[in-house]
Amino acid sequence: MTETFARLLAKREQQGFDDEYLRLADAYEAEHPHSEVPAVFRGAYALAHDDAQQALAQAKQAFSLRPLNFEVWQLLVRCYEALGDVRHLAYFEALCKKFYEVPLHLDLQEGYLEESMGMLSLGLGIGNYAPFAKARVRLVDGKPKTGRGIYVGEFFPRFYARPEAWFWVGCYEGREDLEAKGWIAERGKEEPGFVDRCGGEFVFDTMKAQEVQDVTVEPDGAPVLVPLAGKTAGQTVRFSKEDGSDLVASEDAESHLGKWSFDFYRIEQPTRIQAEAPFVLGTPIELRHSPRRHPVVLHLLVDALSWSIVRERGYCDVPNILRFFSQGVIFDQNFSTSEYTFPSFVAIESGMYPHHNQIFNEHAAYELAPEYVTMSEQMKRLGYYCATLTGMNDGIYTGAARGFDRIIGNGYDTPAFEGVERAIRQLEAFSECDQYLMLHMMDVHVWSARSFHLPLAAQTKLPLEKRLRGGNCADASVYISGCDVYREANLAGIHAADRSLGVLFDYLESHYAPGDYVVNLYSDHGASIFDDTPYLLSDHHVGAALMARGAGIPARGIVRDEVTSSLDLYAILAKEAGFDVPETADSNLPAALGGRARRYVISNTLYPGQIYRCAIRTLDHEFQMRSHEFVDEDGTVDLRKIDTELYERNHPELSSGHLRIEDAALQKEFLDVLHAHTATIDRGGDQWPSMLAARPEWFGAAERKERRG
């Protein structure tokens, strides 16, 4: 612990809020410009002098730097309590309760009840698997009760209250009974068994929407499509002219809505829509093309596709992907920022490393700051209709998907064949507007066979001894080591995804001119299953896919002489669509597309309760580093003691391709890169005692298990 930090802690404890206290805070800030510490201490000073507004300004500054920090939360609780802001008070009290067992003191006031329960649910919840809520707060017999639940037939709560429409959760219907899915969801939304067992299959239809009862839709020179959903079973709406006169024959003017499920209506003239009770109006979709846009921009996220494995196997497993993107650009040396989906997805969507966008802790439902503009927000600003047609809904609580108009998704079972069919139907149904579409496909991802079904080929093609070996593994997917059954499952998933995507590629080529579409295919990370001993940042694990084809993309084929990062998709889309990359982004336009080649790419882990790992790669070398201390809940870590190793990559005489080397000058060069990269998260020895004392039992458990293994 530095002397300045120790003195500030002591003076705060003794209520010594004098001029020397402020001088110490200034001195600490000069030495640590990226730290939340000075603002936290200044906030305490302001509260001690009865200036809650100034304290809140300091607390917000600290929050912008370290949004998942216990001391910051406690300061915000005191500020919002003093200012009577029940909404924000509920959220930060809930975070303190969830992570550090601080009792809730919030008084649920009349008039703020629903919103307070929503914010409590967010603070007590997790950042992924929307619309499922780990800790949904409800009123039972007049008292708040917490339990698992689902948001459906209602709006998601959100941290940043802004005037534009927000996500309303419905049920995705095919051509079945209008009330079928709503009936199921209503009975299951508060049933723990439904939450636990039906999350993979049940598909939700989430749209930007508002609740209305009498609304007039006025097209502006082009037809519009309006999505409508009912809030009750058997609900009808009536369509009429703007002045209330009949639009069609009176007996035909009404339409039935499915409870909690959307249907679309085409409107070509000013039209009034009314009902006896409120219904849901999705954001209207203008049917108009623009020469400044492409008719189709398609993002294909093939979750857990290890491009390193694909390359090692001579690309034989992806014939359709290889054929299609050989007429564009395939980045052969691409690496993800992180080892699993939650931080990787937000990093890709924001173009920022997880410790810069601050979305890395899946245990917290924390929304990306509004000043960070996601890819979908950029495309929405350009006038595209933005929709995710299959996905895990990981971007809702975090805000990573907030630019989309529609998100069709479920917990984890999102096969490519369903996404491809939805995409083709979408392209045909919405052909009159410019579309930005995303498919998040999970065919390739493996989970423990102890808990999840294996792909059919993995069940049938292996002898019993190979089928059983590793089957009782209960580890998270990132720790599943090389076993025949998981390798077979992974390859079966790759074949399935490639086969399905081939249908989509054929459709695009036969229905669109080459200059009318853009397709980007990528993965968020690779897989550990081809490593005998899992290393979270191995070539197999973070060697990810990245490729592009379409308008403005040169036919370069496989690019082997440039390293790229999954972050670079942001800059690639910016070039394709014509928007500017924000200064806050860490994304880079590759040289193969007219930008500048990266000197190196960085992959790292930032999982609370585990050690920090970082791998820095160039075309020829790899630098590996691991900390001695654990990453804290707020994403900071003490890096005073680290272990490092330096390798030559792609060594022809070694099957692993990696030869450990000693090179002092090169080692120093990589260390300089490491220190610059970790400047905002390296806390040194200055750790808040309150956070250290409150660490739960699971902190460090994964690392201890790995060391025992």
Image (cartoon, rainbow, N blue to C red):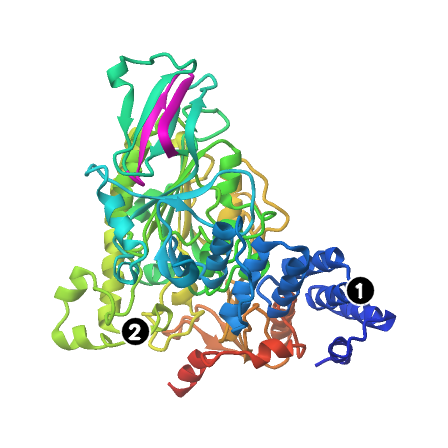
Q: Which residue is mark 1?
A: 49
Amino acid type, callout 1: His
Magenta region: 259-279
Point out residue 43 in the picture as x, y percentages from the top left corner.
Answer: 73, 64
Q: Is residue 378 above or below residue 616?
A: above
Q: Nearer the viewer, residue 440 or 226?
A: 226
Q: Which residue is mark 2?
A: 482
Is residue 42 toward the left or the right of residue 354 in the image? right
Q: Is residue 335 visible?
A: no
Is residue 569 toward the left or the right of residue 173 in the image? right
- Helix, strand or loop at label 1? It is loop
Q: CA distance from mark 1 to mark 2?
A: 61 Å
Residue at the location (21% across, 43% down)? 180
Q: Is residue 483 visible?
A: yes
Q: Which image quadrant for residue 579?
A: top right
Q: Please tell me the numbered disc located at residue 453.
A: none
Crowd rating for badge 2 (residues with CA inside 10 Å; few <14, some 14–19, many 20+) = some
In the rendered structure, are the residues bearing label 1 and label 2 in contact, judged by CB atoms less than 8 Å apart?
no
Q: Nearer the viewer, residue 586 or 257?
A: 257
Q: Which image quadrant for residue 149?
A: bottom left
Amino acid type, callout 2: Gly
Q: Is residue 101 above or below residue 572?
A: below
Of pointers 1 and 2, the one earlier in the residue sequence: 1
Point out residue 480 in the picture as x, y percentages from the top left corner.
Answer: 32, 73
- Work out which residue is located at the far right of the displayed protein and give it: 19
Crowd rating for badge 1 (residues with CA inside 10 Å; few <14, some 14–19, many 20+) = few
Point out residue 678 in the picture as x, y percentages from the top left corner.
Answer: 62, 67
- Work out which residue is located at the far front of the displayed protein and give it: 141
* Predominant secondary structure, magenta span: strand
